Structure formats: C-alpha cells, structure tokens
Amino acid sequence: MRNFVIEPLHKPSMEECRLRIDNLTKPLYSLARLEGITERMAGILKEEKPNNLRHAVVIVGADIAVDGPQNQTHGVESLKAMERLASGHSATHGAAKKIGADVFLVDAGLELDTNNIEGVRQHKLARGSKFFRMHAALTPDIVEQGLEVGFALADELSEKGYQTIGIGTVGERSLLSALAVTAGITGYPMAELLAENNCTLSIQEKAKQLTASLAEHQLPSQDGVHVLATVGSPDVVVLTGLILGAASHRMAVVFDTAETGAAVLAAKCINGAVMDYVFPSVHMGEPVQTAQMKYLGIQPHLFYGFEMDEALGSTMGLSVLDAGMHMLNDMKTFGEASVNVAVDGPGSERQDGR
C-alpha cells in the first residue's frame, strides 16, 4: 500500500471561521450541527470563509457472495442498475445536478461485464467477491489493487479541483459485506447486527454461523487490510482507498449506507486521522448502519426514510455542506448588518460587531 499523509485540520482557519459564525445575526450556536460542519470544512480546506464547493459523486459497483446459494440473478439486477445510472436519469443524478456535482461510475467487481456501458470506468478486480464462510472473500493482492484504484481516483479528482466527494455503491447482496466488515472491526454481537436482516435462517442460527466464521478468520481485528481481504468486497476496498486518498488531498468525504460505512470503518482502522475529513448523511434505520454510527461516535444528519443506495443519501449530504457555505457567506454579521451586538449574556464575549 502506498505511503500517504493525512494532515490535521487547519486550526487557524477554523478559529476565524468560528468567530464569523458566532458574529452572524443569530443566537449563538442556534444552527447546531451546521455550524460545526462549516467550521470543520474551513479546517479541511484551510480557508476561513470557504464558498462555492466543487462536488463529485462516486458510485462503485460490485456483487457480493457470487458463489453463495442466494445468488439467483447472477448479476442481472446490478447490471440493470448500472445501466440506469449511466443513462444519467437516476434519482442520484437529479440531486447531483441541483448542487452542480459530477457523477462518476466505477465497475470494481460486478459479476457481469459493463464494457459496453458508456461512462462506466473499468477497474474490475474480480467478478464479485466470494462468500467468506469457508475461505477469504478476496485475496491480499486484490485488496492491494483495489486500494490503489481508490488512491488513484482521489488523485485525479483532486487534480481536477474537486473539494468534496459523496460516495455510494451498487451491487447484489451488498449488505452482506457491510455486515461482515462491521462485525469484523467492531466486534459487536452478530445477533445485534442481524436484527432486521434475517434471510432464510433464524437470526440465532445465522448469528452463530457467521460468528464462528469470523472467529475462524481471526476476526474481529483492527487490521483494516486483513478485514477487507477476509470479509470485504471490491466496492468497499476501492471506497476505502478513495476515502484515505481524499483525506490526504484535504477533500471531504460524505457517506450514507452501511456499505459506504464499512469503507469508513476500514479506512479508520488504517489511519484514524481520516475521520476529520468524513461526514455522515442520511439515517437508514438499519441495524448495521446504526452499529457503525455507534462505533464511530457520530450521528446522521438527515432523516428522509431512504431505502436505497447508489449514493443518493451522500449526494443529499453534500447539499448540507452547501447549506453551511450559504450560512457562512450569505448571512451578515452584526457589524455588516449594523445591528447592535450583545453586551451581556452568552454572546458578550464572542460577538464583537465586526
């Protein structure tokens, strides 16, 4: 894996940004999380008053457990989904257009070929990952290659001037990989993660089987590369590299589903500094995502009742970053609006009429 450095947030820019936020014509801290998000964006970009963010949305495709009994469609459904995305008429594209975001599609491991779909980048590491019960899902070489694909994509997006990346996935049985990676890193009880994800076996029986499989592969573990090779999938691997690479280029990353959350968990294991650059978006109401948020110590911002992947939630999360920029740049301070500042109370030491 290539060497990379993730720098800490730029504190002077954050302090100046916070001072402006506190002097906006509103009660102190009244915009809650939006203020913290905006302050952190200042630290990421090294700008005290960032504005007009350039967004990219990256959707990575991969099918999961292609050798398992649940693979009844053999990649047909995910192929259709990628075709729909490539047409540019998906819900994600609609949301992306509203915020001026460009959408990039990557085939990292779909079972069927996407060579004839215009606009899909070809980085197929494998024709789907294997089910990890008796053997590792991937190989160390595939993980190495996949991380490099993510790093290279981050390099490219940074060179093109993008400052934020919303990430998503498309693929059949993708939640299985998210489940396994989450359990393999957090060590949370499998029955808790399976609470609403029972397939054909009872929750108790399935939990026992999967827990035993993890133990056979020496999981849980904080070795992110080992976890990815053992129970990961091509999409999660590529997104892990993308997250790490983006942070090394001082780009923010927004994630949404349990699948993208699995990549965040793996990236954090590899380099904990990455979390300064990562933002959640939508609440999915799903146990695996809930466990990820608990482990990471963060909370979703948006409650829309979404039940789909394809980066729609992440794209909506990018709009929250834009909202922070509008707050910072379009609202006036007390001084700019010629409004008297507080002379006593909680605002007296932070609001100076500038």
Image (spheres, grey):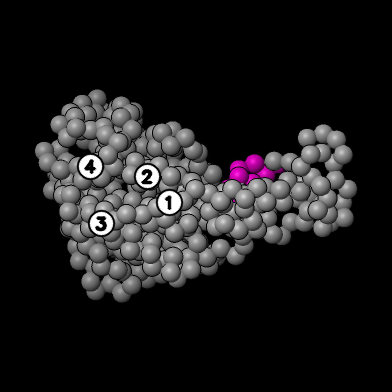
Residue in the image at 35% along x and 69% along y: 86
Q: Residues within 10 Å of mark 3 (few under 14, many from 20)?
A: many
Q: Is residue 14 magenta?
A: no
**Which image quadrant for residue 170?**
bottom left
Q: Which region shows up in magenta?
A: 30-38
Residue in the image at 31% along x and 74% along y: 118
The location of residue 304, given as percent across then percent down, is 51, 46
Residue kind at label 1, given as amino acid type? Ile
Kindly indicate whether the residue at mark 1 contacts the one at mark 2 (C-beta within 8 angstroms).
yes
Residue in the image at 74% along x and 41% along y: 28
Residue in the image at 15% along x and 31% along y: 216
Is 87 or 275 nearer to us in this picture? 275
Is 16 or 37 nearer to us in this picture? 16
Q: Which residue is mark 1?
A: 6
Q: Which residue is mark 3?
A: 146
Q: Which residue is mark 2?
A: 271
Q: Which residue is mark 4?
A: 226
The answer for how far apart the CA atoms under marks 4 and 3 are is 13 Å
Q: Residues within 10 Å of mark 4 (few under 14, many from 20)?
A: many
Mark found first going from the N terminus, 4 or 3: 3
The answer for how far apart the CA atoms under marks 1 and 3 are is 19 Å
Residue kind at label 2, given as amino acid type? Asn
Location of residue 351 with respect to 53 vertically, above or below:
above
